[in-house]
Image (cartoon, helix red, strand yellow):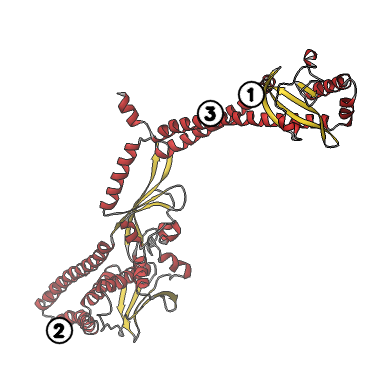
Amino acid sequence: MSSTNTRRRRSVARQLLVGQLAVVVLLVTLGGALALVDARRDSDESIRREVVDIAVSIATAPSTVTALASADPTAALQPVTERVRIATGMDFIVVMSPDRTRFTHTTTELIGGQFTGTIDRALVGETFTETYRGSLGPSIRAVTPVLDDGRVVGLVSAGVTRQKISSQFVAGLPAVLGIIAAALGVALAASYLLNRRLSRQTLGLAPDELRSMYEHHDAVLHSIGEGLVVWGDDSEAELVNDEARRLLDLPEGPVTRERLPESLRGLGDTAVRDEMHLTTTRVLVVTQDPVLHGSRRLGTVTVLRDHTELQRVMGELDSMTSFAESLRSQAHESANRLHTVITMVELGRTEQAVEFATQELELSQNLIDRLMSTVQEPAVAALLLGKVSQAAEQGVELTVTEDTALTDTESFDRRELVTLAGNLIDNAIDAAKQSDEPWVEVTVRESETDLVIQVADSGPGMDADALARARTRGYSTKSGSRGLGLALVTQVVERHHGTLTSETTYGSVVTASIPHE
């Protein structure tokens, strides 16, 4: 692989690390250099303050004025200034007359000679410092006047050579350089740890790969027809596409698990495959899988598919299939009864044949005539007739009460009526079969304000907890099974702001009440 390709494929974390290291080294080096310059400047300033303090202390001492007035100032001042010089670490302390004649000096041979520094400002009463090359070499020195009744009777100069200052500075360099090295080490370690974290977060991908992934990712999210929710380590979704917001009725903004429908909220991070879930308005098929990188779990992806219309159509198809099966069964029974009637006629028992032929036909025809006249919605009438025959095949006596009537069909959707009545009756039939004498009683009626569908059965009934479970996804009245029947009923009832209640009076009674719109 060429070096160009190597640079191109270098990960974001690696490129950032190299850049960070370069910047850190540059900044620490520059900061260290500035620190050294600042330390040198502080050292010079400290020396200036020190030489001023020492020069002023000697100049203001009464003994200095007395010595300058004596016949031999050197004899009185030299021992004192040397003791002070040694104690304070000065390189020289010079006491001189206003005409520059030295009375004291570190090098005794120079006593009596001329002071070579600047004294003009001191002669007018000012204390000052300067850097000057004198008899001992370049030095930082202070010059201050010795005053007697306001007159300048002498001068005092104290100083430290540059060589000594440099030696002191060099002696302190290891500590400064150690601090700089420690700062550089901490910065490099922090950069390395940041690189490792970034490498994990970017999966070691190069910038071009990340950009390409984002572009493809964005295009896919906007093109797929399924809802997609991506969860990270916390409870807030990292990504929600437009279809997912539509299916879950989510507004713009952050999405947390608490904002999801209850059944989806309970999934957590578990893996599921093609599991049916209900919202207040939709039937969703949910698939959820973890996202892994090696053995590390990065998050969870939830895929949502809308099966609302399919479920409604399947419900209607089930009802029509049941009705067709009922008609087939009735046709078979009718053929048997017809053969029986023919045989009875051939045997000359015509009266018994007529009685046998018209007995059940009259009951069935009466039910058909009653439902077709009182229930104006053909789908509901067909459903009720079909369920009567379906229940009979399963050994359950299903009765449609005399007060069943449905005249206002414009306020209610046909498919929703079939969903409501069909699922309530199916659950009642299943529950009734658990009793010794199974029966189901159905009432569909209207009041001035509501449509009421009431289904009673001889089953064990449901208390408040059982009804609450029945209104969630996956509950079925069939023992050991899972279904959507009562959950679909709940969905329709809640969509129209109705009520669903259960009680045990003359049997188990479930009542769905939906207000007229």
For this orientation, the residue located farthest to the top is 109
Relative vertical location of residue 352 with respect to residue 138 in this rendering, above or below: below
Image location of residue 55, percent across then percent down: 78, 29
Q: Residue at 77% across / 31% down in the picture?
A: 144
Q: Earlier in the sequence, mark 2 or mark 3?
A: 3
- Label 3 secondary element: helix
Give the left or right position of residue 167, taking residue 462 as reference.
right
Relative vertical location of residue 229 with respect to residue 360 in this rendering, above or below: above
Location of residue 114 by image quarter: top right
User: Is the N terminus in the top left, top right, bottom left or bottom right quadrant?
Assistant: top left
Image location of residue 89, percent across then percent down: 77, 23
Kindly indicate whether the residue at mark 1 contacts the one at mark 2 (C-beta within 8 angstroms): no
Give the Cα distance between marks 1 and 3: 14 Å
Location of residue 436 by image quarter: bottom left
- Label 1 secondary element: helix
Q: Amino acid at mark 1?
A: Leu
Provide the residue designation for mark 2: 351
Q: Earlier in the sequence, mark 1 or mark 3?
A: 3
Q: Residue at 44% across / 78% down in the picture?
A: 505
Mark in front: 2 vs 3: 3
Residue sitting nearer the eye, 91 or 372: 91
Image location of residue 67, percent across then percent down: 88, 25
Give the left or right position of residue 87, taking residue 505 as reference.
right
Q: Residues within 10 Å of mark 2 (few under 14, many from 20)?
A: few
- Label 2 secondary element: helix
Provide the residue designation for mark 3: 29
Residue sitting nearer the eye, 261 or 173: 173
Q: Amino acid at mark 3?
A: Thr
Provide the residue designation for mark 1: 173
